[in-house]
Image: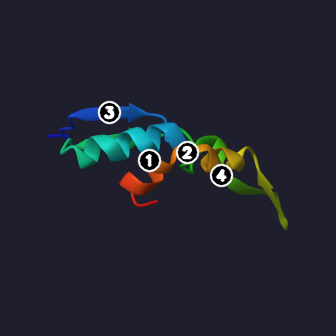
Amino acid sequence: MGQHYDIIVIGGGHNGLVNAAYLAKAGKKVVVLERRHVLGGAAVTEEIIPGFLFSECSYVVSLLRPEIIRELDL
């Protein structure tokens, strides 16, 4: 039989991960589904060609509210 989850979060971007973290902290059994091979959404840095790293919009991580950073120990 398959796994049982209280919450399914669609999308492993920074917003989905923050939501999943808060829900898990509240005692919910959470799974995050992401179509890509990496988590983080726009807040990732990837090697798009050998030796060249590209940050799509990783500055968005700096826009997280300070209380989120504190509450989730980021």
How far is disc 2 from disc 1 in space, using C-alphas? 7 Å
Look at mark 3 in the image and give the residue it sits on.
8
Residue for point 22% across, 43% down:
26
Q: Hey, what amino acid is under mark 2?
A: Leu
Q: Give the class, few, some or many, for how many residues have Cα within 10 Å of label 3's Cα (few <14, many ≥20).
A: few
User: Which of 46 and 56 lies nearest the eye of the viewer?
Assistant: 56
Q: Is residue 65 left or right of residue 41?
A: left
Camera-near label (3 vs 1) is 1
The first of marks 3 and 4 along the sequence is 3
How far is disc 2 from disc 3 in space, using C-alphas? 22 Å
How far is disc 2 from disc 4 in space, using C-alphas? 15 Å
Q: Are marks 2 and 1 in contact (CB under 8 Å)?
A: yes
Q: Secondary structure at mark 3?
A: strand
Tag shown at residue 44: 4
Q: Hey, what amino acid is under mark 4?
A: Val
Q: Are marks 2 and 4 in contact (CB under 8 Å)?
A: no
Residue for point 18% across, 45% down:
27
Residue 68's spot in the image, x, y percent?
A: 44, 47
User: Which of 67 and 56 lies nearest the eye of the viewer?
Assistant: 67
Look at mark 2 in the image and give the residue it sits on.
64
How far is disc 1 from disc 4 in space, using C-alphas? 19 Å
Residue for point 39% across, 38% down:
19
Q: Hey, what amino acid is under mark 1?
A: Ile
Q: Is residue 50 visible from the viewing direction of this image?
A: no
Q: Give the class, few, some or many, for how many residues have Cα within 10 Å of label 4's Cα (few <14, many ≥20).
A: some
Q: Secondary structure at mark 1?
A: helix
Look at mark 1 in the image and give the residue it sits on.
68
Q: Secondary structure at mark 2?
A: loop
Q: Is residue 37 left or right of residue 21?
A: right
Quarter residue 1 falls in: top left
In the image, residue 4 sits, relative to residue 52, either above or below, namely above
